[in-house]
Image (tube, rainbow, N blue to C red):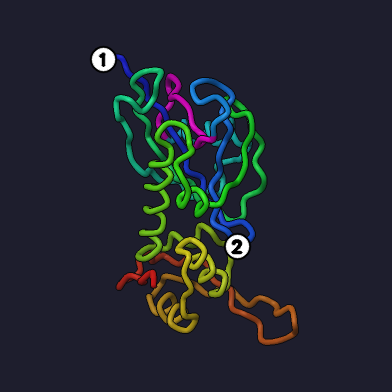
Amino acid sequence: MPQSAVAVDLVILTIRGDEFQVLLVERAKQPFLGALALPGGFLEPGEDLAQAAHRELAEETGLSADGFHIEQVGGYGAPERDPRGRVVSICYMALAPDLPAPTAGGDARAASWVPVGELLAGPERLAFDHHRLLTDAVEQARDKLSYTNLAVSFCPPRFTISQLRRAYEIVWDVRLDPSNFRRKVTGVPGFLVAAGDESAPTGGRPATLYEPGPATRLHPALPRD
């Protein structure tokens, strides 16, 4: 049987301080000692892929997978992607709102949040082929925002329409018309469910809070511009 290893890599995305950010670790081992990389590691005996993703999330960042939206991005198996030998990586993206500062562990010397736009606009500086994994995961997230309820993963359990719109704007890096956005997301039956009112801080009219409804698709899709 051919000799190869299977790994999982994680693109952990959040919105912190009105900025779309990804979690990166500083590698504590060769290859790429000291380089920035996505958290991840090799599959252990008896683990399935999802279990490995959850374990690596906790080991390298100190974050629990509870409350995350986690989905697979794809498989990456270029023969030269890892100088140690043939390694096939399964990439997952994990989304959650306003995550705390991470705590590095495992094979990570440090862990920190980095703006997505800064990484994608500048020269490639991540270990292995992680720039490609990051690019693919961000594009998958941005694409799915237009026709699914993925954006609620960046919001608290109960949120206002303004909070939801701001999540779209930050991830897409655009400005959206508030009236058109409200009409779109409240016009799909079951997409959002009213969950009471939020007290207005200035004593004005309270904003309605919403929760994700049973409908997970937006049709027609919401355009990015």
Residue 23's disc is none
Closer-to-camera residue (223/120): 120
The amino acid on which the numbered mark 1 sits, given as a three-letter code, is Pro
Closer-to-camera residue (199/80): 80
User: Which residue is denoted by mark 1 in the rendering?
Assistant: 2
Q: Residue at x 55, y 40 (%)?
A: 24
Q: Is residue 29 magenta?
A: no
Distance of label 1 from label 2 (alpha carbons):
47 Å
| Count of numbered circles in the view | 2
User: Can you say whether 104 is above or below 99 in the image?
Assistant: above
The amino acid on which the numbered mark 2 sits, given as a three-letter code, is Asp
User: Can you say whether 1 is above or below 59 in the image?
Assistant: above
Q: Quadrant of residue 106?
A: top right
Report whether 209 appears left or right of 88: right
Q: Position of residue 175 (x, y in %)?
A: 48, 73
Q: Position of residue 145 (x, y in %)?
A: 40, 62
> How packed is label 1: few (under 14 Cα within 10 Å), some, or many (20 or more)?
few
User: Which residue is denoted by mark 2 in the rendering?
Assistant: 18
Q: Residue at x 42, y 52 (%)?
A: 138
Q: Position of residue 188 (x, y in %)?
A: 38, 75
- Indicate the secondary structure of the residue bearing disc 1: loop
Kindly check if marks 1 and 2 are in contact, taking CB atoms under 8 A apart as contact. Answer: no
Residue lying at the far bottom in this picture: please name it.
204
Q: Residue at x 30, y 30 (%)?
A: 77
Q: Quadrant of residue 214?
A: bottom left
Q: Residue at x 58, y 68 (%)?
A: 159
User: Where does the magenta region start and end?
Assistant: 36-49
